[in-house]
Image (cartoon, helix red, strand yellow):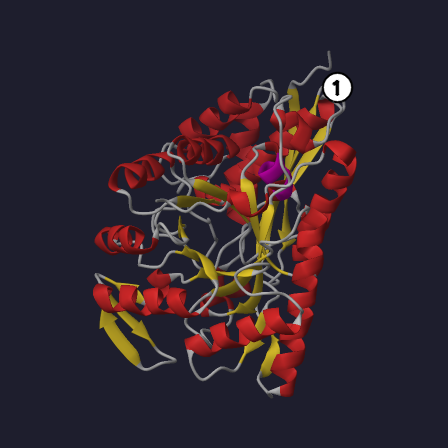
Amino acid sequence: MADTTITRLQARRVWDSRGHPTVEAEVHLACGAMGRAIAPAGASRGAWEAVDLRDGGPRFGGLDVLQAVAHVEGPIAKALRGRDAAAQAEIDGELARLDGSPRFAHLGGNATIAVSMAVLHAAAAAHGEPLWRYLAQGAPVRLPLPQIQIFGGGAHASRRIDVQDFMVVALGARSYGQALEMTAEVYRAAGSLMAAAGRLRGVADEGGYWPAFDSNEQALEMLTRAIEAAGFTPGDEVGIALDVAASQFGAKGHYRLALDRWERDRDGMIELLLGWIDRYPIVSVEDPLAEDDALGMMAFTRAAGNRVQVVGDDFLVTRADRVEAAAREKTCNAALIKPNQAGTVTAAKAALEAAKQAGFGTIVSARSGETEDVTITHLAVGWDAGQLKVGSFSRSERMAKWNEGLRIEAALGRSARFAGKAALRHAG
């Protein structure tokens, strides 16, 4: 047996896909194995998620992470040296104890998630296994159904449109690789249609097209046309998934869509979304109401949960207690799992297991500020999450993760199973 005792921790400031500083951690073991991971960062952040510790001051707009790096090489390294990297839950429990706050406000969630994921990688390396296989521990796994952004909006595109993500889901795909092929065709068709209409303005943070639409609904119209132009039947072979990210334009039951010059209460917001579901091939809606609007989430799930997957992101922030409450109150039927929201791998897995226990759909997700780190692809497979949301079908920090899935599919060979559209959760 390899000696998985932690002997050394290192950290450094590296750079994410927006050119912002972030934290990379390395964990070295007595057997010579090493694990490395990088913390992502979100632009659209839930009020209850782990704190992304930044230095403030004039450097890099206040976004430097030297304090978080120092925490890794100081108190975290001191606490973890000599511990067993194979005891992930104990390691993560020590990180939570050392910080002592509910949201890792002292050490920084960016420091703790980088370390937590690096420990996981080191333990897998010591066992001579790819991370997904180490996580699965012999249990059956599936390649996840991708949700892939075509148009970016909200906080990811300077609010050019209010809705944050217009994505596609390859409902007719029979394999992970085929799902990517189908999405590539839709992405290409969307770009051609946008260029021909004179509405293409580059790409947003996650690689989706940055559009010049006259209304939010126009994006749905264009995306449906793109699915058809790619040769697919909307709603049958390819569906639409939305991340409304309603907390970005709504609070206390009141919502304002700036592009549409539209203001309504929660009932009006629900009516708008239900109308879109009636008119377009929408199969999943994330954060349809704001994070402080549990009544709105409950009403929307009651009205639409037997037709579409209703996903909690800002509303749940990858916290098991909030997932359990959502299951009791029926405020959604699927959970987005973002490890850096939780601060540790163990806490993220607890949220995912709570969601599965409730019969929810589960989607492992990247953030808008990403890197070449591919950990989440392995988590989606090894935890058998069923769905994966990485961003768009462009930019290397996104494609690294989609391509890693292809490698895992190839490694599984004939035993590869694809979650497919059955992974989508419709309560009813």
Q: What element carries label 1?
A: loop
Front residue of this view, candidates 331 and 309: 309
Q: Position of residue 121 (x, y in %)?
A: 66, 32
Instruction: Give the amino acid type for the residue marked by disc 1 in the picture.
Output: Cys
Residue at 61% in and 71% down: 228
**Left or right of residue 328: residue 312:** right
Quadrant where the C terminus sits is top left
Q: Position of residue 14 (x, y in %)?
A: 65, 52
Estimate how packed mark 1 is, as few (under 14), some (14 to 19) or many (20 or more) residues with alpha carbons within 10 Å.
some
Residue 267 x %, y %: 22, 65
Q: Is residue 368 left or right of residue 5?
A: left
**Prevailing SS of the magenta stretch:** helix
Q: Does the magenta stretch include residue 105?
A: no
Using the image, determine if residue 32 lies above or below residue 289: above
Q: Nearer the viewer, residue 337 or 369?
A: 337
Q: Position of residue 379 (x, y in %)?
A: 59, 37
Q: Which residue is drawn at 40% across and 30% down?
A: 357
Q: Can residue 50 be seen in this view?
A: no
Q: In which quarter of the image is the N terminus?
A: top right
Instruction: Find the magenta span and give its range.
Output: 377-381
Q: Which residue position is annotated with label 1? A: 31
**Of 177 and 8, the residue lying toward us:** 177
Q: Tag count in the figure?
A: 1
Q: Look at the picture and state if 217 lies above or below 171.
A: below
- Vertical order, 41 against 80 (above or below): below
In the displayed structure, does residue 402 sit left or right of residue 150?
right
The residue closer to the viewer here, 369 or 392, is 392
Q: Quadrant of residue 418?
A: top right
Residue 132, visible in the rendered structure? yes
